[in-house]
Image: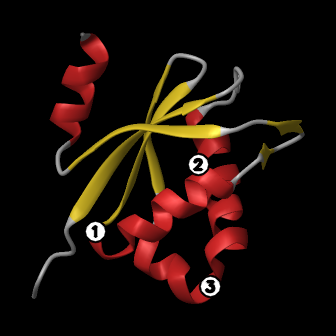
Amino acid sequence: MIRDKKRYILIEASRDLNLRKEELDKLFKQSIMNVVGQLHYYDVSPKVVSVIGERRFVLRCKLKGYENAIIAISLIKKLGSGNTGFYTLKSSGTIKTIMDSVKQ
């Protein structure tokens, strides 16, 4: 059995989100589903792995759907009840590299 390769993406929101990890994960999954549709959603398989402060978080996705994830992130303009924009700061194949860049 072959494992799916993952990508970790450090994302920053344009405003404070004030959401727990579970709430952010659910809202972000719904938003990505709306942008890429059901067929490409499985290729992306997004999951919020870590919340860093009020604006930053780490999203894990499959390598196969990495490009769709980046496009979906840039197209999301509203999350929950407020308008916001999302910016990709860094991406990597390991979460350790992402966390090391946050500490600097």
Q: Along the line of sight, which residue is nearer the eye, 73 or 81?
A: 73
| Three-letter amino acid code at the position of disc 1 | Leu
**Left or right: 49, with 81 as reference point:** left
Q: Position of residue 3 (x, y in %)?
A: 15, 76
Q: Earlier in the sequence, mark 1 or mark 2?
A: 2
Q: Position of residue 71 (x, y in %)?
A: 54, 62
| Circle 1: element type | helix
Q: Quadrant of residue 5?
A: bottom left
Query: Residue at image x 47%, y 80%?
Result: 42
Q: Alpha-carbon distance for marks 1 and 2?
A: 19 Å
Tell me the crowding category of disc 3: few under 14, some 14 to 19, or many 20 or more residues within 10 angstroms, Cα based. Answer: few
| Circle 3: element type | helix
Q: Earlier in the sequence, mark 3 or mark 1?
A: 3
Q: Is residue 32 above or below residue 96?
A: below
Label placed on residue 23: none
Q: Alpha-carbon distance for marks 3 and 2?
A: 17 Å
Q: Along the line of sight, which residue is nearer the eye, 86 or 44?
A: 86
| Three-letter amino acid code at the position of disc 2 | Asp
Q: Is residue 26 above or below residue 40?
A: above
Q: Earlier in the sequence, mark 3 or mark 2?
A: 2
| Three-letter amino acid code at the position of disc 3 | Gln
Tell me the crowding category of disc 2: few under 14, some 14 to 19, or many 20 or more residues within 10 angstroms, Cα based. Answer: many
Q: Return the residue at label 2.
A: 25
Query: In this rendering, which labeled residue sits more in front, label 3 or label 2?
Result: 3
Q: Return the residue at label 1.
A: 63
Q: Position of residue 101 (x, y in %)?
A: 24, 22
Tell me the crowding category of disc 1: few under 14, some 14 to 19, or many 20 or more residues within 10 angstroms, Cα based. Answer: some
Q: Position of residue 86 (x, y in %)?
A: 61, 40
The N terminus lies in which quarter of the figure?
bottom left
| Circle 2: element type | helix
**Left or right: 81, with 31 as reference point:** right
Label placed on residue 38: 3
